[in-house]
Amino acid sequence: MGFLSKKDIQKVDDIQIEVVEVPEWGGSVRVKGLGGLEGDLYTKSLVKGKGKKANVDLDNMTAKLVARCLVDDKGKRMLNQMEVAELGQKSAAALKRIYKVAAVLSGIDEEEQEDILKNSESNQTNDSGTD
């Protein structure tokens, strides 16, 4: 295996799409992994505040990722960020099933998810004044 040129990297289609059965919704959906920029935007959407006042906000975390990863038959996002709250009202089982696939396709591993949860827990402890 040799070194890749800039052109080699630019022309490769490396974002995967997977079909996920969602019995709660009566059908299947297409789930597309996030690219680097979109992944960073997702992570940023979980942080509220700046500097020392920044904390991890897990509210609707699952729906936020799912909304970014559900795509139509042309690979285009089906939902925009304004529709996340509505999506979050759907079956938790369905959303978690899709989330797991979206996380794998987007390179969000279990360790990263655990780090997010740990940061959230430590922020909640610090914010409560019960240290």
Image: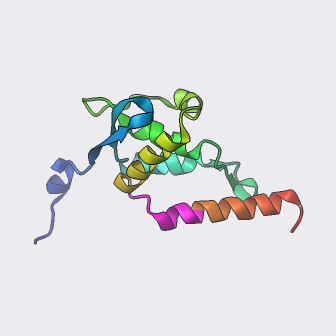
Seen as rendered, the residue at the extreme bottom is 1
Seen as rendered, the residue at the extreme right is 129
Q: Position of residue 86 (x, y in %)?
A: 57, 28
In magenta stretch: residue 2: no
Residue 60 vertical placement versus 1 (above, below):
above
Determine the main secondary structure of the stretch shown in magenta. Answer: helix
Q: Where is residue 91 in the image (x, y as percent from the top left)?
A: 53, 36
- Depth check: give the residue in front, 112 or 55: 112
| Scheme of image coloration | rainbow
In magenta stretch: residue 111: yes
Residue ID at (74%, 60%): 123
Magenta residues, start to end: 107-115
Residue ID at (38%, 53%): 106
Residue 112 vertical placement versus 60 (above, below):
below
Q: Which image quadrant: the C terminus? A: bottom right
- Depth check: give the residue in front, 38 or 6: 38
Q: Quadrant of residue 130?
A: bottom right
Residue ID at (59%, 60%): 116
Q: In which quarter of the image is residue 45?
A: top right
Q: How many marks?
A: 0
- Depth check: give the residue in front, 87 or 125: 87
Left or right of 38: which side holds 88?
A: right
Q: Where is residue 100 in the image (x, y as percent from the top left)?
A: 43, 52
Q: Quadrant of residue 107?
A: bottom left
Q: Which image quadrant: the N terminus? A: bottom left
Residue ID at (14%, 69%): 3
